[in-house]
Image (cartoon, rainbow, N blue to C red):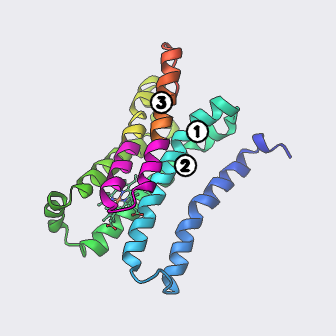
Amino acid sequence: MNFSSDTRFHRQLVLFNGLLPALLILLDGLRGKLGANPVEFVTRATGVLSLVFLVITLMVTPLRKLFGWNWLLKQRRLLGLFSFYYGIAHLLTYLGFDRDWKLQSVPADIYKRPFIAIGMLTFVLLIPLAVTSTNAMIKTLGGKRWAQLHRLTYVAAIGGVLHYYMIVKSDISYPVLFGVVVALLLGYRVYVSLRKPTKSAA
Ligand code: HEM
């Protein structure tokens, strides 16, 4: 079997690994095994998963260029959508459990806890990215404009890291680690575009 050309297998691999965390959270939830504070666990897990899939999405281009893993390109949309889906789950957990569906309390919470504002802004950035992820939208926008719009992915990743950094109280190692990875990916992108100013690195 030629691994690098088996698109169906790659798709199943991404689908499996994207759905598995949700399934495990659901199963543990049903068995009452989400720890002493299940709401906090689910909020944090979905937040981290959204950020992880966002960062993996940003890794696709460097991995293709550095190692020739071109098969990753066909899976980029799905990886990005998983970031969006976990972002939706994260938002719903916040609205349902943290706010008790009292939506009128959200503006005051945004004012009181600035990390909520950054999280919201980051999520808002994910919406146009998800909406324009289809082939039809790429065609409608044109490749160049689509690639320009999708640079928002970097802004969203920076927003996600900042949101994370603002939440943690003592041990900042994880948000800093995510920050370093996003900085390296952004640095790579700038390096490539400076080397080939006429070509897009997307
Ligand atoms: C939709 C708007 C958002 C709201 C209202 C929101 C709210 C929250 C809340 C309440 C927490 C838990 C804070 C705590 O336990 O003290 C949290 C954690 C987190 N969120 Fe968000 N968030 C949003 C969007 C996002 C997005 C888009 C991302 C990623 C791209 C993200 C990534 C994270 C991460 C990484 C954590 C920390 C997990 C941990 O402590 O281990 N959030 N968020």
- Residue ID for mark 2: 79
The residue shown at (39%, 56%) is 172
Q: Is mark 1 within 8 Å of ligand 1?
A: no
* In contact (CB < 8 Å): disc 3 and disc 1: no
The residue shown at (45%, 29%) is 147
- Residue ID for mark 3: 187
**Residue found at the far right of this picture:** 1
**Which x, y percent locates residue 161?**
38, 49
Amino acid type assigned to the residue bearing label 2 in the image: Leu
Q: Nearer the viewer's eye, disc 1 or disc 2?
A: 1
Where residue 108 sits, quadrant-wise, is bottom left
Tell whether 51 sits left or right of 110: right
- Residue ID for mark 1: 60
Q: Which residues are magenta?
A: 156-181
Q: Magenta stretch mostly in which secondary structure?
A: helix
Give above or below for 159 relative to 173: above
Mark 1 or mark 2, earlier in chain:
1
